[in-house]
Image (cartoon, coloured by chain):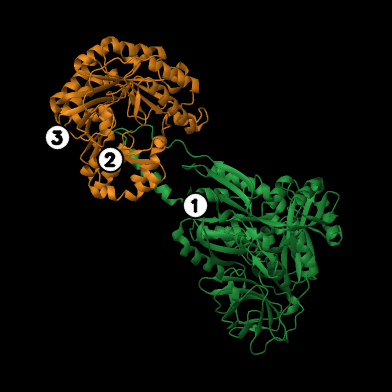
Chain colours: A green, B orange
Amino acid sequence: MDQAHQRAFAVISHVDHGKSTLSDRLLALTGTVSERDMRAQYLDRMDLERERGITIKAAAVRMEYKAADGELYELNLIDTPGHVDFSYEVSRSLAACDGVVLLVDAAQGIQAQTLTNLYLAVDAGLEIVPVLNKIDLPAAQPDAHAHELAGTIGCDEADVFRISAKTGEGVPELLEAIVARVPAPRGDPDAPLRALVFDSFYDAYRGVVASIRVVDGRIEKRAPIAFMATGVEADADEIGVMSPDATPVDVLETGEVGYLIAGIKEVSLAKVGDTVTSRTRPAAEPLHGYREPKPMVFAGIYPIEGDDFPLLRDALEKLKLNDAALVFEPESSGALGFGFRCGFLGLLHMEIVRERLEREFDLALIATAPSVGYDVTLNDSTRRQVRNPTEMPDPASIAEVAEPFMSVMIVTPSEYVGTVMQLCQERRGQLKEMHYLSPERVEIRYHMPLGEIIFDFFDQLKSKTKGYASLDYEPVGLQPSDLVRVDVLLNGQPVDAFSTIVHKEKAYVYGKTMTERLRKLIPRQMFDVPIQAAIGSRVIARETVKAKRKDVLAKCYGGDVTRKRKLLERQKAGKRRMKQIGSVEVPQSAFIEALRVDADGGRP
Amino acid sequence: MTVTARRTEPAAPGRAGGWLEEPGLGVYVHVPFCLHRCRYCDFNTYEGLGGLHAPYADAVVRDIERWPGADGPATSVFFGGGTPTLLEPRLLTRMLGAVRARFGLAPGAEVTVEANPETVDEDAFAALLDAGFNRFSLGVQSLCDHVLAGLGRTHSATRALDALAAARRAGVEDLNADLIYGSPWETGPDWQTTLLGIVDAEPDHVSAYALTVEEGTPLATLVRTGRAAEPDPDVQADRHGVADEVLDAAGLRRYEVSNWSRPGRASRHNCLYWSAGDYVGFGAGAHSHLRGRRWWSVRLPRLYVDAVAQGRTVVAGDERLGADERAGEALVLGLRLRTGVDLGGFVRRFGHGALARREAALADLEARGLVERRGGFVRVAEAATLVADEVARALL
C-alpha cells in the first residue's frame, strides 16, 4: 500500500492496564480476526506470558481499516514488551512506529514504567494519543486522571480519549484518531534498503523469524540481504505480514511492517536493533540506535541432580537460539557442583529463563543469589570484571570497586513519599528529582545501585505503598562504592555458593541473616559446627549447630528388624546424597532454602 | 535410697546380657488385644475384640501345632502384645502348652509374658506361674498420674506399684518394668520420681524407652497440630543419662541401649534378637526369622483366625536376606548391646569377607571415637551409645 495510507503505532501501557484487551478489540473491529477465531490476548504467544499477563517478545500485526473518510488504511500494531528488563527492546519497537497510543487505567493513573516508555516515545518524536481505559469500572476516576495525563504530556484534557476496551466503548473513535493523528511513514522509497529489526524469535521449523519495518527502499522475496551489525549475509527466503497469521508476500514496500525468514539459526545473528540492507545495493549507514544486549544481573544456575548437567547445557543452548540477551558459561562450585554462570537483562528475565528451563526442559534447578557485574581496579591499576562473588580478589589488592547504578523512577501516591524515600535511602539511593504529577501523585527519581534493586526492592516498594507505587529503572553507568565480599564458612570451610558482595555497612546484617538461617537448616552432626560469616579473615557473625546427642532407635526387637533396617537404609541413602563441605554433611535442601530470597528482608 | 540384693541363685543360661554365641531358638506369640489403645502405640493391637479371644487362642494353638519345622527346643518363649494378660490365664496356658508340645523347652528356658497393671492381680500371677511362665514384664511406663494420662494409659501409678507387689507376693522371681521417658507431659522431676519409685519396687529388669512419635498414631496428630510438644532429643538424652545413673546405683546395669538388669537377669529372648538369632512367631502380625529368611503373618486377628480355621497359610509377606545383608543386620542389632559383637563369632557365622568389607568403615568409626575394638569384641563407645545409629548406618 502507498505510504500515505500506512500507519504504524504501538500501545504503551502498564501491566494490566488493558493493552491486550485493546489489541483484541482492534483486531475484531477491523475484521482482522473474526469473532469466532477470537481468543483472548491473541498476540501473546507463549503460555508463560499468558499466565503472567505480560508480553515478553514484541510482535506486529497488520490490520486493514476502512476509515470514515472512505479510504482503506493499513494499520500496523506493534506490540511492545511490558517490563523494565526489556527497555531496549521497547525502544526498538518504538523506533519502528510513527505514533503511540498511551493507554492508562482510569482507576490507577499513569505508572512509572509507562512514564519511562512515554518519555522514550516523546524523545523519538512520536505522535502521542492519550487514552484512559476501563472507564466502565466503578473505581474509575477519568476526570482526575485525564487532568494528570494532560499535564504530563502537555495536551488538552479534552484530547484524552475515554474508552473501555472490554465493552468496546470509545474504541471506534480511537481508531479514527489513530488514522487522523499518527503520521504516515516518511522513508525514502528510492534509497537503498534499510529495514529495522525490532523483534526476532526462533521457530523450530523455520529458524529465526525477524520482525522488520522497512524504513527506506523495499525488500523483495529471495533478495540477497545482509545484517549490518552482525555482518551476517543471507537471502530473504520468505517475507510476509502477520494478519494476524503469517501471510507470505512478494515485496515489502517503504513503511511496511512484516516478517523476514532468511535461514538464520539463532537470534543472536539477527538481533533486535540491527539493520537489514541489500547486498546488491547496500546502504551506506545503518539505522542509528543499535546496541548490544548487555546482561546486568548474574547468577549461578545448577542442576539439583548432578547428572542433569548435560541436559542443562542443552536446554540453555536451545533457549539461547531465541534469546540474544542470555549469556552463560560453565562454572563449578564446591557446594553445588557443576553449573553455569548466567547473565540476564534483569530479574524478570532471570525468572523467565529459570522457569522455562524448569517447565519446558523438566529440570530441577538451584540458583545462587543474583549478583551484578562489578568493575574492580587493583592496586597495580589493572581492571577486571567480577560477575561471581568468588572471583573477587583479595581485599588488600583492591584499589577500587565500582558497581552499576540505575536511574530509578518511582511513581507513588503522595502520602507514601516519606516511606518511599526512606526505603530508597536504606538502599543507598541518591535523590535526583521529585515532581508532582498531580497533587495526589508524585514522580521521584533516584540513582541507586542495581545490586540493591535486585534484592527484593520491588516487593518492598509494593508492600510499603500498599501496592500503589510503580517502578522503572535504567542504567546510568558505574560508580565506585565501599563494597566487600562476605563469605560464609561451615566448620571453617568457605561455602562458595553463599559468598556475596555487599556494601560494607550491610555486611553484618547479611552475615547475621545467613548464619542464623543456616543454623536452622543444617542438620546436627556428630560434632559442633560453627557457622561464620567473614570479610577476608575477619569474622563478623557466628552461630553454632550443636552436636547431635541422640540418634538411636529407642526400641528394636524381632518384629521391627525389617522396618528399622529399611529406615536405616533410607537414612544412609539420604546421607550419600548430601553435599560434603569439609566434614560437614549438608542436604541439598539446605542450599535451596538458604538461597531463597524471601519476603522478610531481602537478601538470603 | 537403699537397695538390697534379693536373690543370689546362679544366672540361668544366656542371661548375662550380651552377644550370644549360640542364640538358640526363640518362640514368640503375639496377642493383639488391648482394653484401650495408648496414644503413642503403633503395635499391632486392637480394642474391643473380646469375642475373639478364645477363637484367637485356638487359632494360635492350631497354628503352632501345624508348624512344619524341626527346630527346637526353645531357649526362650515370649508372649507379647497388645496385652497378653487380657486373655484369661487358661487361654495363655493352652497356648504355652502348645509351644511346649511342639518345640520343647530347653532346660532353664526363659518364658516371658507381658502384662498391663490393670489386667493382673496376685491370683493371675499365680496361675501364670503354675502354667510355666517364669518372667513377667509389666507396662508401668510412668509413676506420675498426669504423665500416664497424657500417654493414654488407663491405670494409675499406685495400680502399677500394686501390680509389681502382687507379682512378688505370688512368687514371681523375674520381674521387668517397662518405662517411657521424654514424653510431652513429663518434666525432669517427674522422671526422677518414676525412677526412684521403680527402684524402690526392686524389679529385676527395667526397659526404659525414649518416647518415639510414630506416624499414624494419635500422638503424631497431637504433635502435628501443636497440641503436644514434639519430644526434644536433647531432653531425652539427658533423661537417658539420669536413668543410667539412678538404675546403676540400684544395681541395675545397662546391657542394651534401653535395657537394664540385675546380674544374670537380662532378657534371654531379647538378647537372641540382638544376636541375630532365629525365632518363630505365631499370632496376627507376628514376625519370624530362620537362617536368613524372614516372614510375617497377616495383621488382622480376624483374618488370622479365618486362615488357620480354613487351613490356609497366615504368611502375609517375607524376605530372604543376602549373606552380606545378614551380616550387616547382625552388626546393627549386636551393636545395641553393651558387650558389642564377638568378632570371632561374627566371622564364624558370616565369613571373613563380611568383616573385611567393613574394615574401612570400622577403622573410620574407630578413628572418630564411635566404636572400640577390644578383647575380640567390637562395641559402640560408651559416649556414643545414644548415637549408635550413626554407627549402624556405616556398617549396614
Q: Is residue A555 above or below residue A1?
A: above
Any part of residue A516 in sight: no
Mark 2 and mark 1 on one chain: no
Q: Quadrant of the N terminus of chain B?
A: top left
Q: Position of residue A204 (x, y in %)?
A: 51, 71
Distance, label 2 to label 1, CA atoms, is: 33 Å
Chain letter belonging to callout 3: B
Distance, label 3 to label 2, CA atoms, is: 34 Å
Q: Which of the two residues, A373 or B346, is positioned nearer the viewer here?
A: B346
Q: What amino acid type is highlighted by mark number 3?
A: Gly
Q: Are marks 1 and 3 in contact (CB under 8 Å)?
A: no
Q: Mark number for residue B376? A: 2
Chain letter belonging to callout 1: A
Tag 3 secondary structure:
loop
Q: Residues within 10 Å of mark 2 (few under 14, many from 20)?
A: few
Q: Are marks 2 and 1 in contact (CB under 8 Å)?
A: no
